[in-house]
Amino acid sequence: MTPFAATAAAVLAAGAAVLAASLGTPPWVPFGLAALALVLAGSVARTDHEGILDWYIPAGLRAVELGAICAAGIAAEVAWPVLYLLLTVIALYFYDLAAGLDKAASPVARRDLGLGWPVRSLIALAAAAVAVATAPVVATVVYGVLAVYVASVFVGAVVAGTVRASRAAAA
């Protein structure tokens, strides 16, 4: 499968996972579709994106991450404000990285601190699976902690980058 085709299939699987979760199917359906989406997306994440349509791949990978997290959150009955908060923080964090790379000025010196989309997605899926087996509050708490963590990395990087820039300007 070409990287673009695999990404497109992953996006469709993530969308199907969200739809399945919103229709109230048994939790294994959205979890399975989200896992399929992550496997497909993971298969192309490290490939060279040199095809004519491969510039869509980063956006597709982000759609897969957000879709998998959303589907798992809906299936596990994560509180809507917490789900929205996590999705928003991840979107802001990604935009900062993308804009910083575009301008060669990202303040995030250690990108690994943001955990990466596969790890964030797997944490969300695991928390949702545990919540389905126990209580919805488990996933809500984990989603909240993940949102606070990613926001802390983002804000910390912005503050550190601003301090570095002001010290460099003063020198």
Image: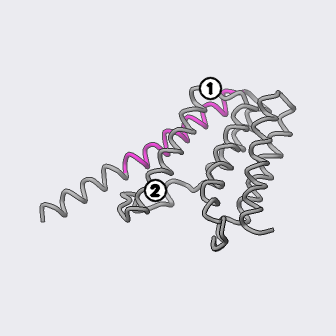
Instruction: Give the percent coordinates (x, y) of residue 14.
Output: 75, 46
The reply to whether the magenta stretch includes residue 134 is no
Front residue of 31/23: it is 23
Give the side of residue 114 with respect to residue 62, left or right: left
Q: Quadrant of residue 127?
A: top right
Front residue of 138/55: it is 55
Q: Tag 2's secondary structure? A: helix
Check disc 1 and give the amino acid type: Trp
Q: Can you identify the residue that label 2 sits on? A: 97
Number of marks:
2
Above-or-below relation of 53 to 86: below
> Marks 2 and 1, how far apart in space?
26 Å
Question: Main structural element of the magenta stretch: helix, strand or loop?
Answer: helix
Q: Check disc 2: other Cα within 10 Å, few if <14, some if 14-19, many if 20+.
A: some
Q: In which quarter of the image is the C terminus?
A: bottom left
Q: Quadrant of the N terminus?
A: bottom right
